Image: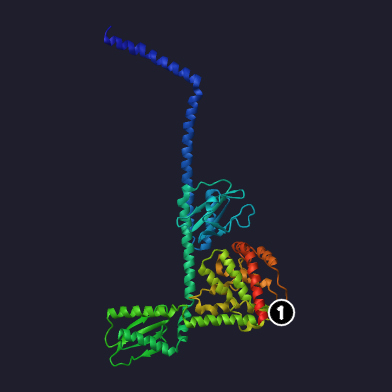
Amino acid sequence: MSIFDQSRYYFNEVLPEIILSNIAQINDFLASFWFIFFLIMLIFFMLFINLFRKKLYLQSKAARYNGFLQELSLKTQKRDVEDKLIECIHLVKAKYVAIYELRGETYILIESNAIEKTDVNAPLRVGRKTLQTFTKSGNYRVTSVVNSTQNKMLLFFSHQFLDIDTDYGFFDIVLSYYEQIANKFKIEGGETQSNLGKSTSVSLMKLQMDQNEFFKFFIALVIKITKAQGAKLYTKDGKLIFEYETKTVGSSLQKVFYIRNTPYKLEFYDTKPLTPQSVTQVGSFLDMAGGFLINMNQNSEMVKNYLSFLKFTNEAIELENKYYKNHSLIVQTISVELAKSLFLSEEEIDTISLGASLHDIGMIGDLLAVINKEKFEEQDMNLIKEHPLIGGIVVEPICHLYPIENIVKYHHERFDGRGYPFGLKESQIPIDAQVVAVGEFYAGITSDRSYKQGKTHEEAVSEIKSLRDKMFSAVMVDAFLDVEKSIRTKIFKLKSSLKEESDVA
């Protein structure tokens, strides 16, 4: 048989037989083990569906996160950003969330939607060292997210542990934005406080020497440095304050300088134009001089004397009424303890201490007669409500060094907005004023008055607890409760000491 015939025989007879035989074997195998084949196909199908669903989920989550960031970027007020952060629970399927700020080695509670909820406890503070072990609160799992600067933190409370490591970048952006807004809020507040004293700084300087002598000294010094022929000092609205040797023959106006941070401008007169070098020199000197005018330091005898005068005045006010004697000292003691409980900085505590001691400095003039009355009429209350404003004016000249005006002006504001004189509420009230407000309230209700007997410490604690989110924020109430035993001890020792001094006198 030829090769051609063999090939034809193979392809026509043998190969079909082999294929049919293999197909029969496959059919027999599938008939016996079809479920294995089905299972394999099902696994591949499920893997495909899972990958498809995961892709859709990631796309959906990315869209939600992007939308959240876009909405967040439109918030420029600290309170609005905090409210928006609370909505993070919808992104991670948590039940509650709490916002914290790092102070020292402790995170302090700023805002939470868990306040007043009985099934969860968002602690007032969480130590950095104990944060890793804080994973459960009641029936809830606790998941923490700290931003890259370590200054802000979110605590999520959920029924199961949240694995949000893959979303850390998103939360870092969110918390960093909040930190930026919070810092801006602090800076603006600081600038506002700094600017409060600028309008009176020059007046304080004038008090340290005769007004004419002050201006003569200032202008003569500038003339000597610049070697100009003469100068005139004006207010910016054109009122002539002082003139120095401008009648020199041949001299004419060469340059007008506005003295930074003061309400003055200085005109230079000479027989020849000022050189660019001289202009720079004069400008630099005037900047330095302007800075000198507004940056009086604590070593200034005028500031020391004025502060001593305020303290003396405050003591005199309290001596006018036996029921108010040592009132400020008691408020100061309570406020400092409360400030320490909030882990405020030493600088903030010092400010609160001074502000608490002078919080009622506005009780002067006609108000002294009013507070001695046993019963207040409506016009009396209207007059009393002016004392924070009067006090703010009284302490303004030293507020660029001792920023206590917020305390003096806002210590009668309430968390619910029903206080006076401005009706501020919630985060609109500076924290130092909130602290002193608690001290003022405690001192007031535990002291005897002509028309009532003071309450006990326990009664005062109970009343402060009842005023949570009404007169005081939950944070202030919780901080007070943390140190109320210490406050009771310190106030007892203080009153005992004062009584002994009184008996000796």
- Note whether 353 is above or below 302 in the view shown: above
- How many numbered marks have been drawn onto this rendered protein structure? 1
- Note whether 133 is above or below 297 in the view shown: above
Give the residue at x 50% y 19%: 32
Asked whether the viewer can see residue 73, the reply is no
Give the residue at x 47% y 84%: 203
Residue situated in front as seen by the camera: 109 or 49: 109
Give the residue at x 53% y 65%: 344
Q: Residue 347 in the image: x percent, y percent?
A: 50, 69
Q: Residue 404 in the image: x percent, y percent?
A: 53, 74
Find disc 1 in the rendering and name its residue. 374
Residue 336 located left or right of residue 51: right
Q: Residue 121 in the image: x percent, y percent?
A: 61, 54
Under circle 1, the secondary element is loop
Residue situated in front as seen by the camera: 74 or 242: 242
Asked whether the viewer can see residue 396, the reply is yes
Residue 233 located left or right of residue 502: left
Residue situated in front as seen by the camera: 10 or 488: 488
Q: Which quadrant is the C terminus positioned in? A: bottom right
Q: Which quadrant is the N terminus positioned in? A: top left
Snapshot quadrant of residue 477: bottom right
What amino acid type is highlighted by mark number 1?
Glu
Q: Residue 39 in the image: x percent, y percent?
A: 50, 28
Give the residue at x 30% y 10%: 6
- Label 1, residues with CA under 10 Å away: few <14, some 14-19, many ≥20: few
Q: How is the image coloured?
A: rainbow
The residue furthest top is 1
